[in-house]
Image (cartoon, rainbow, N blue to C red):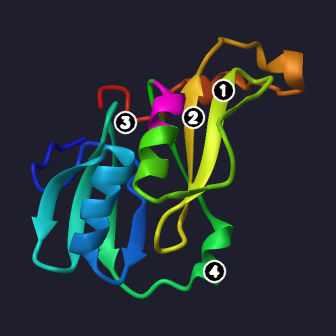
Amino acid sequence: MQANRSIPAATVLPELAYPDVNAAADWLCRAFGFAVRLRIADHRVQMSVPGGGALVVKQGEVAPDSCSSHSVMVRVADVDAHHARAAAAGAAAAGAPTTYPFGERQYGVRDFAGHHWVFTQSVADVDPASWGGELHAESATPPHGLEDS
């Protein structure tokens, strides 16, 4: 894949709409620990997520009722510390972090615009068959052309 300094190297880039992209970027940095990668006038902000992820904050109106059809999952090193940081910034968490049988400790939260986020920490390497999952061998192989990205 061709490198381009104008776009993050991540393969998937969620774009979330906020009425004020600069205020949204500032809040996401403060509440979730993200960092601004690139500002594009007042209509787009590329955000870096610790650990290698990325997302784009774009100008647009948000209808919180329609935000229930998606969530953005972000892996973090310490979900409990992350939860405390988000709560201190006013994020509306659905509850305290919970450890699940599939080896993840997670909490869900809505940001100030109504977007749903899930923050997750791997706490164990669990065989998916032990909790009813079915791992497909081909899912562990990168798609053709992405092996070196």
Q: Give the secondary structure at mark 3.
A: loop
Which percent across, then down, holds residue 82?
A: 46, 37
Is residue 8 placed above or below 51 in the rendered structure? below
Answer with left or right where residue 56 lies relative to residue 4.
Answer: right
72 drawn magenta = no
Q: Main secondary structure of the magenta part?
A: helix
Residue where numbered disc 1 is placed? 104
Mark toward the start of the polypeptide (3 vs 4): 4
Which percent across, then down, holds residue 56?
A: 31, 62
Residue where numbered disc 4 is placed? 66
Q: How far apart are marks 3 and 4 (CA)?
A: 35 Å
Check disc 3 and give the amino acid type: Gly
Is residue 47 placed above or below 65 in the rendered structure? above
* The residue stretch that appears in magenta: 78-82
CA neighbours of label 4 inside 10 A, class few (<14), some (14 to 19), many (20+): few
Residue where numbered disc 2 is placed? 120
Check disc 2 and give the amino acid type: Thr
